[in-house]
Amino acid sequence: DIQMTQSPSSLSASVGDRVTITCRASQGISNSLAWIQQKPGKAPKSLIYAASSLQRGVPSKFSGSGSGTDFTLTISSLQPEDFATYYCQQYNTYPITFGQGTRLEIK
Amino acid sequence: EVQLLESGGGLVQPGGSLRLSCAASGFTFNNYAMNWVRQAPGKGLEWVSTISGGDSRTDYADSVKGRFTISRDNSKNTLYLQMNSLRADDTASYYCAKRGDDCSGASCSIDYWGQGTLVTVSS
């Protein structure tokens, strides 16, 4: 199975900050990488697919990059509604696997 | 507007069975693969199973293989998950999720998620 490792596991930031979350795959996955946001008690929401393409309706403050084994999610100008847990997910190979999550908290 | 509405969760004893349903609307259901993804309380996301749109090919996580069966009724726009021989570690919220636009890998991205249904396995 492909292991997805996110860093950091948690992150404190202030409103207006720009933050970057990293995801590393244990083997190459081309660009078959998604980023997912989940707020407490809510369903997941897909943000990015194919490493850098925004899902419909997702604001451009979210951006993704990377290919192969190393990927990043960048969120610019943090707003209160952006504080959530973020997961990366690979769909290059079965079984589909997720990172352990990065909890983004308000400083 | 895409909507995915899960139902069928609840409390079940270890060794018992449960069938989850996911009613889909807002898209041409039979054109899209569908997934089940679960989340144990306080834990991360875990892929459970995928079923293709047309020919209903299936894939399962090793943790549920032989115990869970994914199926779909395209005439009813409904996805199912039959869960047998349930164990305490199957306790989780189960989400129905629709295939997205990118199928560059063996599977595809996910674009929409349901609100989830909670399954609790306990005596």
Image (spheres, rainbow, N blue to C red):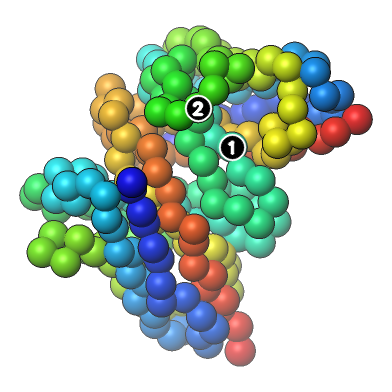
Secondary structure beneath dot 2 equals loop
Residue B75 is left or right of residue B21, and the answer is left
Residue B20 is left or right of residue B12, and the answer is left
The spot of residue A94 in percent (x, y) is 34, 38
Q: Dot 2, crowdedness within 10 Å: few (<14), some or many (≥20)?
A: some
The spot of residue A103 in percent (x, y) is 74, 37
Secondary structure beneath dot 1 equals strand
Q: Dot 1, crowdedness within 10 Å: few (<14), some or many (≥20)?
A: many
| Residues flagged by tags 2 and 1 on a common chain | yes
Give the image quarter of residue B40: bottom right
Q: Which residue is mark 2?
A: A58
Q: Earlier in the sequence, mark 2 or mark 1?
A: 1
**C-alpha separation, residue under disc 2 versus residue under disc 1:** 11 Å
Question: Closest to the observer: B78 or B46?
Answer: B78
Q: Which residue is mark 1?
A: A37
Q: Residue at x 56, y 65 (%)?
A: B92
Q: Residue at x 43, y 85 (%)?
A: B16
The spot of residue A97 in percent (x, y) is 47, 38
What type is the residue that disc 2 sits on?
A: Val
